[in-house]
Amino acid sequence: MTQNLKVITIGRNKDSDIYLDESCKLASRNHASIFYDGNQLMFRDTSTNGTMVNNVRVNHRTVPISDGDIIMIAGRYPVSWAQIHAFFPPRKPEPDSTVWSNGQPKDSQPINRTKWNWGAFGLYPIWGFFNGCWWGFLVSMCFGLLYPLPNIIFGIFGTRWAWDNRKWNSPQEFVKTQSVWAIWGIVIFCLQILAYLFFGMTILANL
């Protein structure tokens, strides 16, 4: 039983690669097999009582499986991925070939994710739709009256959220986009301050 095996067996048969002892009475002696079809792992059930794969019953048929799927023989006896990996070691992820315009990987780019985001601060309900944070609109609907608390939170975390939640062609594109939003965010903030001063002075004048 080497790691180069293309097919492994599961069952109460003592010759099975993954052996289920006699206490697993609902499992068949030749319950199932797992094989690699050249593209991915496949699970083939050949049992009487079937198998549950991610809570879906599989009986006398073949389904693809992926690392982390929940496999329950006869709906009761789990097959762990540690057992499967003994025969089919997990593949190492291929290096991310995505590079930016300067030829460097994404993770090497000097993006300051903790930078205050004026666009998110001043316009987070609209800003969110264009920066991978669509739920900003829901926050404004539920907590908008708590101004400026939601604005401050978006100002603090906006740069991080936008960088993480949306795909950008380059760091330069990200910085340029946030700079444009920052201009509008500052303009809106200043207009809000002027509006508050105007209404405040109007109220004082009428006292």
Image (tube, rainbow, N blue to C red):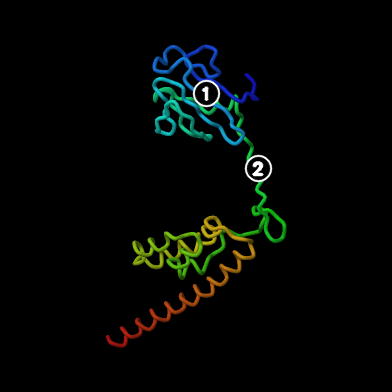
Percent coordinates x, y for residue 70 in the rendering: 46, 31
Specify whether 51 is left or right of 169.
left
* Badge 1: residue crowd in 10 Å (few <14, some 14–19, many ≥20): some
- Image quadrant where one finds the N terminus: top right
Determine whether the residue tagged by mark 1 lies in a helix, strand or loop.
strand
The residue that mark 1 highlights is: 33
Nearest the camera: 51 or 115? 51
Percent coordinates x, y for residue 78 in the rendering: 45, 25
Nearest the camera: 130 or 20? 20
Percent coordinates x, y for residue 133 in the rendering: 47, 60
Percent coordinates x, y for residue 190 in the rendering: 47, 78
Determine whether the residue tagged by mark 2 lies in a helix, strand or loop.
loop
The residue that mark 2 highlights is: 94
Hey, which residue is sitting farthest front in the picture? 60
Displayed quadrant of residue 77: top left
Q: CA distance from mark 2 to mark 1?
A: 28 Å
Look at label 2 and name its amino acid. Answer: Glu
| Residue 124 circle label | none
User: Which badge, 2 or 1, is on the more N-terminal residue?
Assistant: 1
Residue at point 35% right, 64% down?
141
Look at label 1 and name its amino acid. Answer: Ser
Residue at point 63% right, 40% down?
93
Residue 140 higher or lower than 191, as above or below: above
Nearest the camera: 156 or 176? 176
Disc nearest the viewer among 2 and 1: 1
Displayed quadrant of residue 102: bottom right
